[in-house]
Image (cartoon, rainbow, N blue to C red):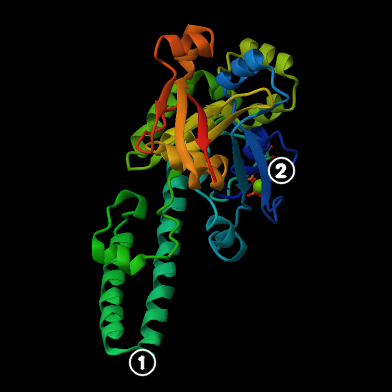
Amino acid sequence: MKIGIIGLPSSGKTTLFNALTRGKAATGGFGASRSANIGVAHVPDARVDRLTGIFNPKKTIYAEVIYVDLPGNISGDLFEGEALNQLQQVDAILLVARAFEDESVPHMDGSVDYRRDIEKVAFDILFADIALLERRIERLTDGQKKMKVGDREQAIKNVETLKGLQADLENGTAFRERELDDAESKAVSGTFTISGLPLLVALNIGEDDIGDTEALEQELAGILTGKSTGGAAICGSLEAELAGMSTEEEAEMRAGLDAGESGLSRMIKLSYEVLGLNSFLTVGKDEVRAWTISAGTLAPRAAGTVHSDIERGFIRAETVNFDDFIECGSMAEARNRGLYRQEGREYVVQDGDIVNFLFSV
Ligand SMILES: Nc1nc2c(ncn2[C@@H]2O[C@H](COP(=O)(O)OP(=O)(O)OP(=O)(O)O)[C@@H](O)[C@H]2O)c(=O)[nH]1
Ligand SMILES: [Mg+2]
């Protein structure tokens, strides 16, 4: 999974990026970030830790999330060129909205107001999408002369449909919030839109606001009511500081500050929720590993995330859910109790399933 971090200049994107990836990219705002930072975060998973203790494998591999931290751009072309190329490759966007007060970090609009900022970026996204559809309209219009009659009729229809979609964007409807009918799907097919991406919002709060995290998240939830969207409040600077510490030091500091679960865990849980993702697990002497799939994924497809050959030659999946396995204490006992099951092509892999795929190629 890949997530693009966006937001106004100096909102704390790189600070949060460093917290999420334990990175050390330069912060400081005002164009401190001139090009994108790319980093990997390991998805914390207590089940993987527990299974590692049991199977004692040579390797433990956590699921990964790749974060791309995009530079804030004052001139309004946030969604052009390099940034647009990067966004075309992400599964979701993470919008960082500044809520921290700090006189040493000036705000481009002179005051801190996260509602205004979220609205502003959301508007810029809709505007960018209108332009993306416009380019498609131009291509379809220019290409018409060379088309065969039937294709030309279709192109004319598609242009009409695209204009309708543009009007909806102008009225504030993001692509992620709408269902597309057949004609609309056909017209936009293959066209990338930014507002079609799931939207996560990280409210970057000050250290003084940590006690109000819950109330602020409720406020945020009141704004983010659309489909495929969700938010969390996080203190970027504190999380970045804690991410640079050892696990023990971090736990001690968190307890002392009443800072709760790590920002990384919370952002990742939010991402999985909003994107409708699950994890399944594979175990063995060589490797204990977590894999990410969309909720509702069938066994052969899930096998394909491990290796395309296993999907191609899929025979069946042997599976037991993590909780059942722990309760039984061993695979043998899980088998005795009928909880270690043989499942076929139609099986929907569940979150926390420990799976062994049988295949032949
Ligand atoms: N007080 C406080 N300062 C913060 C917080 N998060 C970020 N900052 C400061 O705000 C400034 C900008 O942070 P960056 O992380 O560089 O912001 P950015 O959004 O990446 O900035 P650009 O990439 O230039 O758009 C830095 O001086 C940070 O130390 C926070 O939670 N509290
Ligand atoms: Mg930055």
Residue at 57% x, 33% y is 100
The x and y percentages for residue 312 are: 49, 48
Q: Earlier in the sequence, mark 2 or mark 1?
A: 2
Q: What residue did someone put label 1 on?
A: 145
Question: Does 150 appear above or below 257?
Answer: below
Residue at 47% x, 26% y is 318
Check whether the beta carbons of the residues at disc 2 and disc 1 lie within 8 A of each other: no
* Pointer 2 residue Cβ closer than 8 Å to ligand 1: yes
In this view of the protein, which residue sits in the foreground, 107 or 91?
91
In this view of the protein, which residue sits in the foreground, 133 or 234?
133
In this picture, residue 286 sits left or right of residue 155: right
Between label 2 and label 1, give the one nearer the viewer: 1
Kind of residue sitting beneath label 1: Lys
Q: Spatial distance from mark 2 to mark 1, Cα to Cα?
A: 51 Å
Residue 153 is drawn in which quadrant? bottom left
The x and y percentages for residue 327 are: 47, 7
Residue 87 is drawn in which quadrant? bottom right
* Pointer 1 residue Cβ closer than 8 Å to ligand 1: no
